[in-house]
Amino acid sequence: MRKYRPEPLDPVLVINAYVQGIFPMADEQGRISWYAPDPRAILEHNNLHISHSLRSTLNKGLYTIRIDSAFERVMRECAGCAGRTDTWINEEFIKAYTYLHRHNLAHSVEAWRAGRLVGGLYGVSLGGAFMGESMFSTEKDASKVCLVALVNHLRSHGYSLHDTQFLTPHLASLGVTEIARDEYERRLHQALRQHCKWS
């Protein structure tokens, strides 16, 4: 994995980095570095795995899905969700990504129940590429329901690349796989030439 020297988290720099397949993360001291993993984790939408238990949750219609109604709240929940050991989503990240959200470059998908935000995810949208950043859940399967909603949204709007950065056991259980960085860059450049509209 390539790791680049620290830079301030300026929103323009963030977008320029994503275009090159690079993304920022902060360590526990708040120091920001830039990463380009090899291999890179992506979700092929046709490979999304919906388990029997998740399908049961979907069929019950427990959650109301909203898009972009509480972007900053989703980020803060991702930063502070129970059991999280890393602290890479700090105030500098929240400031930069809410700026991107106001300019229609970062988006959230949210699960609500009885008027409460109980799950969500957020990421960056450029051309036909969506770069997933983080997700949280305070009720069963809420973040997974958001992922299913996101995949349906991206499919319906013609997105061709769904980047999840790193492969984790949780993401692997949902169908996320890895590709070589060279292949990722080729697909990223193709996706960036698309003119997909988020909404």
Image: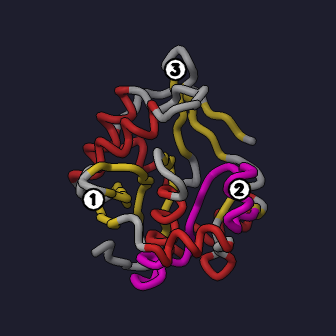
Q: Residue at x 54, y 78 (%)?
A: 160
Residue where numbered disc 3 is placed: 31
First in sequence, mark 2 or 3: give its number: 3
Q: Residue at x 58, y 75 (%)?
A: 55
Residue where numbered disc 2 is placed: 40
Dot 2 and dot 3 residues touching (CB under 8 Å)? no
Q: Secondary structure at mark 3?
A: loop
Residue 68 numbered mark, or none: 1
At label 1, counting other C-alpha atoms closer than 10 Å, the crowd grade (few under 14, some 14-19, many 20 or more) is: some
Q: Nearer the viewer, residue 120 or 55?
A: 55
Q: Secondary structure at mark 2?
A: strand
Q: Quadrant of residue 62?
A: bottom left
Q: Position of residue 191 (x, y in %)?
A: 52, 74
Quadrant occupied by the C terminus: bottom left
At label 2, counting other C-alpha atoms closer than 10 Å, the crowd grade (few under 14, some 14-19, many 20 or more) is: many
Residue type for callout 2: Arg
Quadrant occupied by the N terminus: top right
Q: Quadrant of residue 46?
A: bottom right
First in sequence, mark 1 or 3: give its number: 3
